[in-house]
Amino acid sequence: MKKYLIIISGALGLLFGACKSSSDYQNLTTDRFEEFVTKPDVQLVDVRSSEEFIQGHLQGAINIDVQSDDFADRASAMLNKKKKVAVYCRSGRRSANAAQQLVKAGFKVTNLEGGIVDWQVAGKKVVK
């Protein structure tokens, strides 16, 4: 009996694990993210506050603050669902939240692991 429970538990774990990964966003390291955002079908979004954005952001990024009450509505109005979305914030936490919201709204999303902090530590360029 114990053997059957273990087999069933394992099968359920595989089933639910596979379902989750197919609808989630992906995380990329700075080098892979830098390569990813150069593709023409990618929309780059900085989800920090406008004050943070002004202090320095990735070239070509648009700013949609994930902490604003209308984030999902603004993102849906400003972004094309037919194109991929790349998001980042300061450390990766807010952008992970934004990525989850965007996935729920029907976008295909990629998140920068470690955010703009890791980006700058890696010597990558930011613009003001």
Image (cartoon, rainbow, N blue to C red):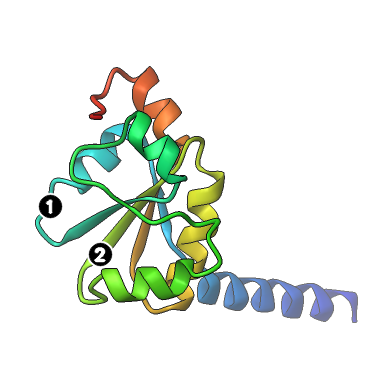
Of the numbered discs 2 and 1, the one sitting upstream in the chain is 1
User: Residue 108, how many percent across, how many down?
Assistant: 33, 68
Mark 1 element type: loop
User: Residue 122, how many percent across, how many down?
Assistant: 34, 20
Residue in the image at 48% along x and 76% along y: 104
The alpha-carbon separation of the residues under discs 2 and 1 comes to 10 Å
User: Residue 37, how many percent across, how many down?
Assistant: 20, 47
Q: Is residue 50 left or right of residue 37?
A: right
Which of 33 and 128 lies nearest the eye of the viewer? 128
Residue furthest left as drawn: 40
Q: For the C terminus, which image quadrant?
A: top left
Mark 2 element type: strand
Q: Are marks 2 and 1 in contact (CB under 8 Å)?
A: yes
Amino acid at circle 2: Lys
Q: Is residue 92 above or below residue 111?
A: above
The mark total stands at 2
Q: Is residue 122 above or below residue 34?
A: above
Residue matched to label 2: 84
Which of 17 and 8 lies nearest the eye of the viewer? 17
Residue in the image at 38% along x and 70% along y: 74
Asked if residue 41 can be seen in this view, the reply is yes
User: Residue 9, how many percent across, how many down?
Assistant: 75, 75
Residue in the image at 27% along x and 69% along y: 79
Residue 28 lies in what quarter of the image? Answer: top left
Residue in the image at 26% along x and 24% along y: 124
Asked if residue 22 can be seen in this view, the reply is no
Which of 55 and 33 lies nearest the eye of the viewer? 55
Amino acid at circle 1: Lys
Q: Is residue 89 above or below residue 95?
A: above
Res. 39 mark: 1
